[in-house]
Amino acid sequence: MKIAELVMAVALALLSLAIMWKSGEAPWGAERFSNVGFNDSGAPAGGFWPFWVAMVMLICSVWAFANGFLAILPVASVNDGMRTTLIVLLVIAAAYPIYGVARLLISALFGEGIAGAEGAITVGHAIFAICAWLIAVMAVFFVFCFIFSTRDQRGSEPYIDRHGIGVLLTVGLPVFLLVLLTETISVYFSMALFIFYYTLVLGRHGPMLSLALALVLPFWMYLFFDITMTTTLPKGALALENALYSPLGTWFREAGGLTVSLCFLAGGVVLVGAAVLSARRAA
Amino acid sequence: MEVLGLLADGVWTALQPENLLICFIGVVIGLFVGAMPGLGSVNGVAILLPTIFFIKQVTGSDAGPMIFLAAIYYGAMYGGAISSIMLGIPGASTAVATTFDGRPLALKGRAEQALVTAAIASFIGGTVANLFFTGFAPPLASVALSFGNPEIFALMLLAFATFVGLGGDSIPKTIISIALGLLCAAIGFDVIEGEPRLQFFTLTKEWWETNIGGEFFIDPIGFSRPVNFLVLAIGVYGVGEMLWTLHTTRSDSDMSKADVSLGRIKTATKTTFKEGWRGTSIGSLLGFFVGILPAAGATPGSLMAYGVAKMTSRRPEQFGKGSVDGVAAPESANNSASTGAMLPMMTLGIPGSPTTAVLLTGLVLLELEPGPRLFEDQPDFVWPVIGSFYISNFIALIVNLAFIPLFLWMLRMPFTILAPIIFILSTAGVYAATQSMFDVWLMFWFGLGAFLLRILDYPLAPAALAIVLGKITEEKLRQSLQWSDGSAAIFFNPWFDRTGTGETFWIAPVISWIAVALILLPLFSYLKKLMQGPQKPAHWQG
């Protein structure tokens, strides 16, 4: 769990860095990071907002990482050997930004300035480089933490236990399939399969009730969304739409509101019947 | 006086049969989602948000859908208490504090006392807050009408700062959550200059198609617009929350028995007024003002009310062992806070809680512009909705007391039937609202991400608020900076000459400095705590 905290912080920092990079993509072929500062009229340009928000996010990821790190290895537990290793690692990690800052200084002093001239380093580049370096530092600390912390310090509680993985596999994966199948076999059939699986396998409600739920609930959804709200939900492959949904939709619309209400009620009767029957069988 | 006339008109409109029916249905749904563990007001409102188009179609007014959503919100505040008392599991995070004394009362065989106290305290809390709301909203809206770009940006800053300062979660995690929401809202095109930005995978797709060939498996067209709030909200509160509930709830608990005959309800009502008046008054007052704060909302409101009621009680030793005051305080507070959270939402366009963020999105979907102009331009919308707050509260009280046995029966509905319904409603709801499979996929990934972040105690409510406020925050920031030629002094310095006439502007600097103070305050205590070791944050949703 404690290591997961560090991994998540690094992942979020990488995400922030990617967003910073993407924000710096100036439109119409302009140079990278030329849009993250102020434009000629003194107002922030298009990439300004996402770039700096992402930077704040990155700094907070570092902060969260530091919290996680100190939870595993409190300052008091660091001995001399660990300290020396850490300093060596940090010096190695610092080589890149030192090089970057030196280039920035040289370009500011002797080059065309730091504000976006051809070939020069912009402020955006510099900030990006520093942020990239922060992630490198996080990686160094991560490795350090892994080497020097004891199993007790890392904690025995896993990030996701067996039960959690079970939830992801038995529920998360079927939800993934529910969305995936929507595009091929239409949302209603996909729902029916999902409900049937969920109630029968996970809920152990018996085949009769599961089947009734799997048939009636999607049917109700169909009546509500497609017929009453006239919001079409995905109908899957074209052949299915032509063969089933088009005639069905036309039929319901011609039949009118009363028939729709009766169909709705009929669904309720089926459900209640199935529930009563399966309750009786269970008793 | 004018306000009373408008309110009377509003109540009258809300009493029209169709609105009354909507109110009733909303309250019943709210009671149900509130009572079901794992579902709260925010899940209920988010998943049912797409139905507002249907309600608008049927009623022909903009007020109908809003009355419906607000009724769900109220109902959920009442419903949360039912499972807190009967099962000992809070039906929603807003009812966590109700378990402290509600459950012990039920275990003592006085479940009906706890249920009745919860219902009556909720009603009083809600009604007191409605009176405050009616009194405060019009003047606040008229003050807010004079706000310019810097003032609005300062308000947004304050909203985020309250989250950081008062949210109670880890500060870096809260800020990360806010940043994620803001970035989701920034995808697509830049709001001022119309330049494309953050259109992920466009270059990857080009590269893939030239170098590898064949179609790229992600269609980047979905990133040519900001992430829809609904997609995030349903992903986080529908799919993510469901996975989380399944992950954390591992066994069913026993339900207490309640004797809900008319005679027992009468006695319990008397006891409520005799023993619970102090908690009710504290909860009603405190809840409203805590609810107004953008970071707070009903959960911290109810917890604080419980704390204050215990602190000021003459018999604090009874708290936690089945005190009537201990049920009345949090229950009146969560209802009061839910109305309080509506105040900034309706008058300033800033939601006070995740649920009001969903309601705000509802306003936008109905093509109404949230903010102070709403009171000026849409009195036909605003006052019936406010009127419906009073009506919903009353209906919730009656339905709650009359149908307690029914709700107890419904609580027996297995979660294994409810959960798949939530999943399919989430899928259908997102598609119905956006008509895009891309968004359905995005919802799924958000849900999964929310689940993984939730395990590590990342708060997700700030992200939901930030995605709603993202566009306006950026727009106002950039417009203000354009005004001041890039100087941030326009937000912080009252003597900054923004009009060129030497006029001073106090509102934006005052709000901005309060925001800065709010951000800095916990930093100090945080540094102190850092020395003492890590702490476990509490979660909330309502």
Image (cartoon, rainbow, N blue to C red):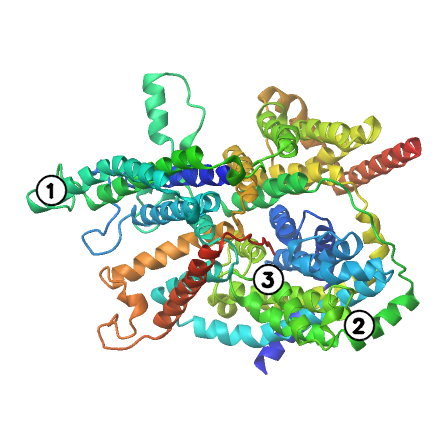
Left or right of A161: which side holds A97? left
What residue is disc 3 on? B300
Which residue is drawn at the image coordinates 77% and 69% (left, top)? B324
In percent of width and height, residue B318 lies at: 76, 69
> As displayed, is residue B355 above or below residue B16?
above
Label 1 packing within 10 angstroms: few (<14), some (14-19), many (20+)? some
- Label 2 amino acid? Thr
Foreground of the two, B137 or B450: B450
Q: CA distance from mark 3 to mark 2?
A: 23 Å
Q: Residue furthest left?
A: A110
- Label 3 amino acid? Pro
Foreground of the two, B55 or A49: A49
The quarter in which the N terminus of chain A is drawn is top right
Q: Earlier in the sequence, mark 3 or mark 2?
A: 2
Which residue is drawn at the image coordinates 31% and 68% (left, top)? B492
Mark 3 belongs to chain: B
Left or right of B174: which side holds B57? right
Mark 2 belongs to chain: B
Left or right of B351: which side holds B71? right
In percent of width and height, residue B251 lies at: 75, 41
Is residue A231 visible in this depiction of the protein?
A: no
Does the residue at mark 2 contact the one at mark 1 (Cβ under 8 Å)? no
The quarter in which the C terminus of chain A is drawn is top right
Mark 1 belongs to chain: A
Provide the secondary structure element on which disc 2 rests. Answer: helix
What residue is disc 1 on? A107
